[in-house]
C-alpha cells in the first residue's frame, strides 16, 4: 500500500493510478473527464501533497494545477498578498483575520472592536452599540428589503459591511490552501470562493467566522451574515480534512428593552450556493454550530438540480443543530458521514439532512446517532427525493417521511470511482480520521 500511495503522489492522471494500484470501487470504469475517487481507509493516514487531485464531484473536469512552486505564510498581510497570486499556499499556524477584534466570549468586546465601533458610529463602545441596537428593535423589526427597519438600521448595516470587508479572504481560481500541522488555519474571518474554479482547501482549522453586527429578523431574533466558507457560483472546489468550529457561546439581548431574544453571531460554516457545481466536502469536522451547511439558498433560484452536483463523504457533524446540510435544487452524493450530538451541545439538534425543494440525494452507509432528533426532514409541500441504502438510523424520531419522497433505486449515476465502508464502522472511523491534523503534509 505504501508503494501505491507513492505512485499516487507522483502520477499525473488518475487513470494511471487506478491501473497501478487496482482498487475496486462502486463504479465500473473511470470517466474520461478526469473524475477521482474517495480515499479508502488504508490511505487516509498517508502523507498528502498539494499536487493531489480532488475526489468525488470536485474531480470531474478538474484542471491540473501547477504545484512546482509555493509560498508559506504565517500572518494576514502575507496571506492576502499570496491570495492575489493564487497557486499553492501553505498556512503555518493560526492567523487572526479579525486583527484583534474577535472577543473572548460571545457578545463580548475587545479594545480593537470598541475602537472600530467608535470610528464607524456615534457609540463609544461595542456594548453601548449592542444595547442601543437591541433597544431600537421590536419583534416586528425585519432588517431586510421588506422592513419595517429599526432606527439604527443604517448604523448596523454600515458596520456589518465594513467589518465583513476587513475579515474576508477572497480566493481566486487555481488556488490550493493547505494547513501545516494540526493547528494551522484562520480564526475570526471568512473565506469567499466566488465565481472561480479549481480551488482546494485542506488540513485547515477554520474557527469563529464571527459577526459582531447581526441584524434582527421577525420571529427569529438577531442573525449573523458571514459564512466561514462561502462557495458561490464556483466550480471544482474540494474542501478536505478541515475543522470548522464555533468557540463562542450564544447570548441573548433584550429587544425593545424587555423581550429576550438570541444574539446569533454565526451564520453558515460551509455554504454552497448560486451556480456552484462539482464540489466535494470530505473528511471534515463540523462542531458546535446552528445552521451548519446550506446548499441552495432559495426555492426560486433559476437552476436545475443537475447543474449543482456535490459529494459529501466521511464528514463528522458533532453538536450541530441543523442543515447537515439543507439541500435545494442540487444533486448530492452523501456517504459514510457521521451525525451525532450529546448533552454538551450548545444548540439542540432538530434534524440532520434537510431534503428540500427539487433535491436529488443518493445517501449510502451514513450513521445517525441517538443525539440527532430527526435524521431526515424536508418540506410538507415542496419535496425533494432521497435514495437511502445501507444507513444506520438511531436518531430519536427517525425520518420525517411526509416531508420528502423516498426513492426505491438510485436517483442518478455516480460518475467517479469511490469506496465506502459499512455504516456500523462509520462512527469510529470518521472520528479517528475527520478534521484538521489527521493527515501529514508532504
Image (cartoon, grey):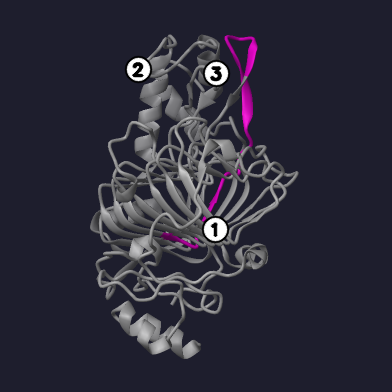
Write down the region rendered in magenta.
Answer: 239-260
- Residue 280's label in the rendered image is none
Tell me: 6 left or right of 275.
right
Whole-percent x and y of residue 24? 46, 80
Picture residue at 45% right of the left edge, 25% below the top: 117
Q: Which of marks 1 and 3 is nearer the N terminus?
A: 3
Q: How far apart are marks 3 and 2 (CA)?
A: 16 Å
Q: Does the magenta stretch include residue 222?
A: no
Q: Name the residue under label 1.
A: 315
Whole-percent x and y of residue 41? 56, 75
Q: Mark 2 points at which residue?
A: 145
Whole-percent x and y of residue 60? 31, 64
Picture residue at 48% right of the left edge, 12% below the top: 141
Q: Mark 3 points at which residue?
A: 219
Tell me: 128 left or right of 259.
left
Say what secondary structure mark 3 lies in: loop
Pick the quarter of the image with the C terminus.
bottom left
Picture residue at 27% right of the left edge, 76% below the top: 68
Tell me: 431 left or right of 265.
right
The answer to whether any part of residue 73 appears in the image is: no
Circle 1 crowding by C-alpha within 10 Å: few under 14, some 14–19, many from 20: many
Say what secondary structure mark 1 lies in: loop
Foreground pick, 7 / 364 = 364
Amino acid at each position: 500500500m505504501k508503494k501505491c500511495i507513492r505512485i499516487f503522489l507522483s502520477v499525473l492522471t488518475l487513470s494511471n493510478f487506478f491501473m497501478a494500484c487496482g482498487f475496486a470501487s462502486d463504479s465500473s470504469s473511470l470517466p474520461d473527464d478526469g473524475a477521482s475517487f474517495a480515499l479508502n481507509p488504508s490511505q487516509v493516514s498517508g502523507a498528502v501533497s498539494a499536487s493531489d487531485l480532488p475526489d468525488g464531484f470536485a474531480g470531474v473536469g478538474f484542471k491540473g494545477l501547477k504545484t512546482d512552486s509555493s509560498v508559506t505564510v504565517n500572518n494576514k498581510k502575507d496571506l492576502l498578498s499570496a491570495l492575489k497570486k493564487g497557486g499553492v499556499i501553505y498556512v503555518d499556524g493560526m492567523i487572526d483575520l479579525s486583527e484583534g477584534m474577535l472577543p473572548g466570549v460571545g457578545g463580548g468586546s475587545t479594545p480593537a472592536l470598541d475602537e472600530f465601533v467608535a470610528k464607524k458610529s456615534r457609540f463609544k463602545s461595542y456594548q453601548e452599540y449592542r444595547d442601543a441596537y437591541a433597544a431600537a428593535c421590536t419583534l416586528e423589526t425585519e432588517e431586510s428589503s421588506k422592513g419595517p427597519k429599526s432606527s439604527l438600521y443604517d448604523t448596523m448595516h454600515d458596520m456589518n459591511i465594513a467589518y465583513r470587508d476587513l475579515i474576508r479572504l477572497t480566493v481566486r481560481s487555481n488556488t490550493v490552501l493547505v494547513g501545516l500541522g494540526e493547528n494551522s488555519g484562520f480564526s475570526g474571518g471568512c473565506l469567499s470562493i466566488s465565481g472561480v474554479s479549481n480551488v482546494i482547501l485542506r488540513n485547515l482549522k477554520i474557527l469563529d467566522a464571527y459577526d459582531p453586527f447581526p441584524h434582527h429578523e421577525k420571529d427569529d431574533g438577531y442573525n449573523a451574515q458571514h459564512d466561514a466558507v462561502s462557495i458561490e457560483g464556483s466550480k471544482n472546489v474540494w474542501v478536505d480534512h478541515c475543522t470548522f468550529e464555533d468557540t463562542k457561546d450564544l447570548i441573548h439581548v433584550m429587544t425593545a428593552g424587555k423581550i429576550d431574544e438570541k444574539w446569533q453571531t454565526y451564520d453558515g460554516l460551509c455554504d454552497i450556493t448560486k451556480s456552484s457545481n462539482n464540489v466535494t466536502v470530505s473528511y471534515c469536522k463540523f462542531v458546535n454550530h446552528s445552521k451548519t451547511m446550506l446548499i441552495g439558498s432559495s426555492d426560486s433560484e433559476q437552476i436545475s438540480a443537475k447543474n449543482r452536483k456535490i459529494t459529501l463523504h466521511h464528514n463528522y457533524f458533532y453538536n450541530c443543530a441543523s442543515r447537515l446540510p439543507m439541500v435545494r435544487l442540487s444533486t448530492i452524493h452523501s456517504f459514510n458521514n457521521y451525525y451525532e450530538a450529546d448533552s454538551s451541545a450548545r444548540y439542540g439538534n432538530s434534524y440532520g439532512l434537510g431534503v428540500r425543494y427539487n433535491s436529488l440525494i443518493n445517501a449510502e452507509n451514513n450513521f445517525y446517532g441517538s443525539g440527532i432528533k430527526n435524521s431526515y426532514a424536508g418540506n410538507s409541500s415542496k419535496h425533494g427525493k432521497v435514495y437511502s441504502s445501507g444507513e444506520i438510523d438511531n436518531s430519536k424520531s427517525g425520518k420525517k417521511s411526509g416531508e420528502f419522497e423516498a426513492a426505491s433505486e438510485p436517483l442518478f449515476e455516480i460518475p467517479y470511482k469511490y469506496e465506502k465502508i459499512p455504516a456500523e464502522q462509520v462512527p469510529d472511523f470518521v472520528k479517528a480520521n475527520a478534521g484538521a491534523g489527521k493527515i501529514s503534509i508532504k
